[in-house]
Amino acid sequence: MSLRIASRPKLEKGGRFDVVIVGGGPAGLSAAVYASRFLLKTVVLTVDVGGQLNLTNWVDDYPGFSRISASELVARFRDHAQSFGVTIVPGVEVKSVMRENGLFRVLGTGGVDVYSGSVIIAVGAMRRKLGVPGEEEFQGRGVSYCSICDAPLFKGRNAVVVVGGGDSALEGAALLSSYVGRVYLVHRRGEFRAKPVLVKEVLARDNVELLLNSVVTEILGEDSVKAVKVLNKVTGETRILEVDGIFIEIGFEPAREFFKSIGLEVDEYGYVKVDEWMRTNIPGVFAAGDAINMWRGFRQIVTAAATGAVAAYSAYQYLIEKGLYRPAGFK
Amino acid sequence: MSLRIASRPKLEKGGRFDVVIVGGGPAGLSAAVYASRFLLKTVVLTVDVGGQLNLTNWVDDYPGFSRISASELVARFRDHAQSFGVTIVPGVEVKSVMRENGLFRVLGTGGVDVYSGSVIIAVGAMRRKLGVPGEEEFQGRGVSYCSICDAPLFKGRNAVVVVGGGDSALEGAALLSSYVGRVYLVHRRGEFRAKPVLVKEVLARDNVELLLNSVVTEILGEDSVKAVKVLNKVTGETRILEVDGIFIEIGFEPAREFFKSIGLEVDEYGYVKVDEWMRTNIPGVFAAGDAINMWRGFRQIVTAAATGAVAAYSAYQYLIEKGLYRPAGFK
């Protein structure tokens, strides 16, 4: 479902930018909109355009759009950035960011080798997956990785499965139990690591059934999810739950190795430490979106977009301070 | 230009809500979208729907909309919130928020008297105005209060005036000098209080003319701004500058008295102190948007919307923790 740009732009080797944005999800594209409005020469280097939006189908929580397909929202973010002259280069994995002669040199796959006055890291985080048959096939068609984002889309449905035992899973189960008839909460352990108050909230719901010491082994469906196979690891029993969806809330994996290779400070969970202005420990390098340690546990399109905008503003300020601001329109 | 809701909803006296949102700009409406998605019984009490968006005409910086009229964007935010069942009551000025029996009692004009488990303060801040003839008449038609937001809309125009001597004014002048042919920077004093690096940046532009010790006395135009009258307070001379727009960057006035009456802690500038989760010093009271001390100096629609979303999430968490969560759909 990820969007491709018709002709991939060629990047001149050794070319100079004001901002290189690493990552093309909502945070990176919003940063691109803002950076280009500050007349910064801006390039987005990204594996795919859309980021985690490519994991979903419908969006009804980005303020201003009551309901829009994820791919259309991605296209609108992309077009918005491009309308201000941003270059977006998909299919690129950035391999290194290093200081060189007062600038940053950014190397990536496909021979990407550019210089920039500043860098914005907006690579997101990987949603952990179950790795079971059917998971990829039904992604966005009953398989969701964000209960808070998608619960209202399941309003009035018969039943769903939630997988996990942390805050997000319990919060998801509580919320979903108000939207759907029945919630099965599947957790591989015998107890939850979520906050006690969330566990209590879920236990108080008479339409939530707990399946502890259990794992999902397969997701079944036709056009969309119809059932989930669950194995009880203690009894060895397998149940087939007829459900309309499955919410996989087993956490995120930040890009620890990449952050480490750049020299970015991270928090205990592996997210890039930023201050209010999205400044990292490296002057000239900013971060935004799901890669950062802010608003952990509440990762939304609008929060990613806001932090991207702030990062671009801070990059602009940084370039002015360092005498590196060279606006294209300057006469 | 402010939007009216066809029939003003009647609020039952003593009625009970989960969240009362005070303010109906982007922050308040985004909070409403999110609160209602958490199935919280939500009401927005506001003087007008749209807040500072009503001061402008076109928006091209909210990611996802390359260009949209401010009134349409407000309508889309409003409709989005209402699609989830939020009650919006315009024409109400909230007068007090006080603790009563473990809830908050919220009193407002027009006999508003309701109870709520939590409150979100999203009243924005007042843009300071010059108070000169023509200012109100040409608002959104050449008169702007946000250079960063509106500079690209003036791309290729002949000339504009920027008024002010602080960071926002100097930053605005620098940015506008790249978008338009000529910038007149009008400041009532003989020197700037902006950061030296910003002053240096502006002085380096050969298309910026400084008019110090000077004040705008009138804004002239037909359909839109055509000229600005400037009085030099030292020489007594009046000049008429032919321009396409005027950017009034003389600061904001937060709602100090209102915050004080509620007991909210504010920072040195008068903005409500919040933590990362939009929690104020009063448990159960959250704040968002231009009213808060975060991202001061960079007040955007998308940043307001994000903080509104976070405030709603935090209110939801608070209600669960306090045993006050009573989701409508709960069976």
Image: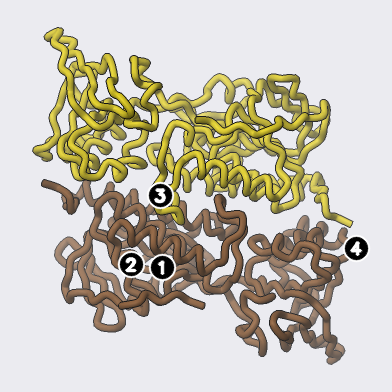
Chain colours: A yellow, B brown
The location of residue B116, given as percent across then percent down, is 22, 63
The location of residue A96, given as percent across then percent down, is 68, 22
Instruction: Identify residue type, mark 3.
Output: Arg
Residue that numbered label 3 is attached to: A67
Question: Which numbered tag is attached to residue B24?
Answer: 1
Instruction: Identify residue type, mark 2.
Output: Val
Question: Which numbered tag is attached to residue B99?
Answer: none
Residue that numbered label 4 is attached to: B206
Left or right: B280 as drawn, with respect to A78: left
Q: CA distance from mark 1 to mark 4?
A: 42 Å
Left or right: A236 as drawn, with respect to B290: left
Q: Secondary structure at mark 4?
A: loop
| Residue A122 makes an appearance in the image | no
Looking at the rendered structure, whether the residues under marks 1 and 4 are on a common chain is answered as: yes
Q: Residue at x 15, y 27 (%)?
A: A210
Residue A272 or B67: which is nearer the viewer? B67
Q: Secondary structure at mark 1?
A: strand
Residue that numbered label 2 is attached to: B44
Looking at the rendered structure, whether the residues under marks 1 and 2 are on a common chain is answered as: yes
